[in-house]
Image (tube, helix red, strand yellow):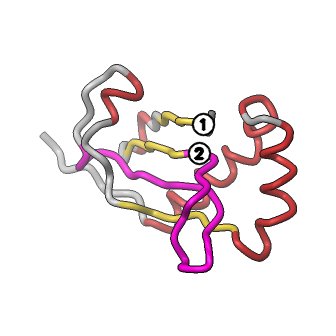
């Protein structure tokens, strides 16, 4: 089996943010979109995080964490912790088969 070339964190962040901007209007509450737009400049964050092992609970499919990147988009608090997460992205490292899953804020 050939080794999968992992996504560069900046590339994963850019991909997630572009998809987020495109899909947020259909998937987030209008109040959340307004909050995000008003607060993003001061408190917004797009973070590359360690890929969680529990994505199967969210998407119903077992995944190999080593084959995916995870990116969170949200707002940080005064302690610089992301406390308001608008979307969590799971992006495949496989360039020829670039799948992604998103868990939107409810």
Is residue 37 located in the magenta-colored stretch of the structure? no
**Mark 2 packing: few (<14 Cα in 10 Å), some, or many (20+)?**
many
Q: Specify whether 48 is left or right of 54.
A: right
Left-right relation of 57 to 16:
left
Q: Is residue 89 above or below residue 17?
A: above
Q: Horizontal and vertical percent for residue 50?
A: 32, 59
For the view shown, which residue lies furthest in the left direction? 1
Q: Nearer the viewer, residue 15 or 37?
A: 37
- Label 1: element kind: strand
Closer to the chain start, of discs 2 and 1, is 2
Name the image quarter holding residue 79. bottom right
Which quarter shows the N terminus? top left
Q: Is 46 drawn above or below residue 28 in the view shown?
A: below
Residue 82 belongs to magenta span? yes
Residue 104's label in the rendered image is 1
Looking at the figure, which quarter contains the C terminus? top right
Q: Which residue is mark 2?
A: 87
Q: Give, as a single range, the part of the protein colored magenta.
A: 65-87
The residue furthest front is 78
């Amino acid at each position: 089996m050939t080794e999968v070339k992992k996504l560069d964190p900046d590339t994963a962040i850019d991909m997630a943010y572009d998809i987020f901007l495109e899909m947020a209007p259909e998937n987030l509450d209008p109040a959340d979109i307004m909050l995000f737009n008003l607060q993003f400049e001061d408190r917004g964050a797009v973070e590359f995080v360690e890929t969680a092992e529990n994505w199967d609970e969210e998407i119903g499919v077992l995944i190999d964490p080593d084959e995916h990147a995870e990116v969170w988009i949200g707002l940080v608090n005064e302690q610089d912790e992301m406390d308001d997460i608008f979307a969590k992205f799971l992006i495949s490292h496989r360039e020829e088969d670039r799948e992604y899953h998103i868990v939107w804020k409810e």
